Structures are given as structure tokens and as C-alpha cells.
Amino acid sequence: MSDFSLADLERIVAQRARSGDPESWTAKLFAGGMERAAKKFGEEAVETVIAALGADAKALVSESADLLYHWLVVLAIAGVPLSDVLSELESRTGRTGLQEKASRSRKE
């Protein structure tokens, strides 16, 4: 098993975003702003769903990696650190999924 983590990828995304390298996909996404990055994230989400429904494990792994990468780009552009998302997930572990969902619907 690899020691590579989402936190490692978050750091790489931040470094490449600042690089200004015209050959960097990450730098290009940042230059395109939230609209471009969010659209790409959405495309990757659809491709991940298609891979899951196709029961193609190799494609699901590949598309999941693309999805996580683009998700971290969107978070970075929005100025939301991965740690905030992880803290939110951690706060939900003391409740069942149904309890957590019910608490969100009351807020809306």
C-alpha cells in the first residue's frame, strides 16, 4: 500500500497552481477559474458513475483518481482546505447517515 495521501495531492495541486507553467494542467485549470474547474469536476463525476455502472474496476479506479484530483482543484480555487472537509466528515461519524441527513434537511 502506498503512503501517498489526499493531503499529498492537495500540496501538489497548490504547488502546480502557483507554478504558472504553461504545460501544467493544474495551472491551466486555475487560470480558467472556478467555472472551468467545476465543469471539469462534473465531467469526471459523470465518467466515474459510468465506470461504476459498467462494472469496470480498472476504469473506476482511473476515473476515481481523476475525480479526486479535480475535486481538490475545485476546493483549492474556492480556498477550502481538505482538512475542513475531513473535519466535517469526522463530525458526522458519531451519527448514522440517516440522522446526519435529517439534520441537514432541517437546516435548509
Image: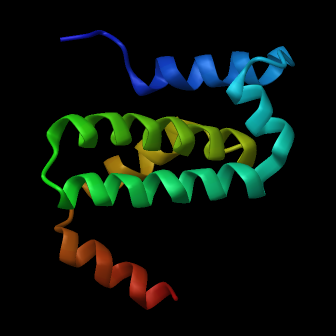
Going by the image, does 11 lie left or right of 37? left
Q: Looking at this view, is 108 or 55 the one in front?
A: 55
Residue 70 placement (x, y as % from top left):
55, 41
* Quarter-of-image position of residue 13: top right
| 45 over 12 or under it: above or below | below
Tell me which residue sits at (48%, 23%) in the image. 7
Going by the image, does 102 lie left or right of 37? left
Task: Quarter of the image for the N terminus: give it.
Answer: top left
* Quarter-of-image position of residue 49: bottom left
Tell me which residue sits at (41%, 79%) in the image. 104
* Quarter-of-image position of residue 17: top right
Q: Is residue 4 visible?
A: yes
Residue 59 placement (x, y as % from top left):
26, 40
| 13 over 73 or under it: above or below | above
Residue 66 placement (x, y as % from top left):
45, 37
Residue 101 placement (x, y as % from top left):
31, 78
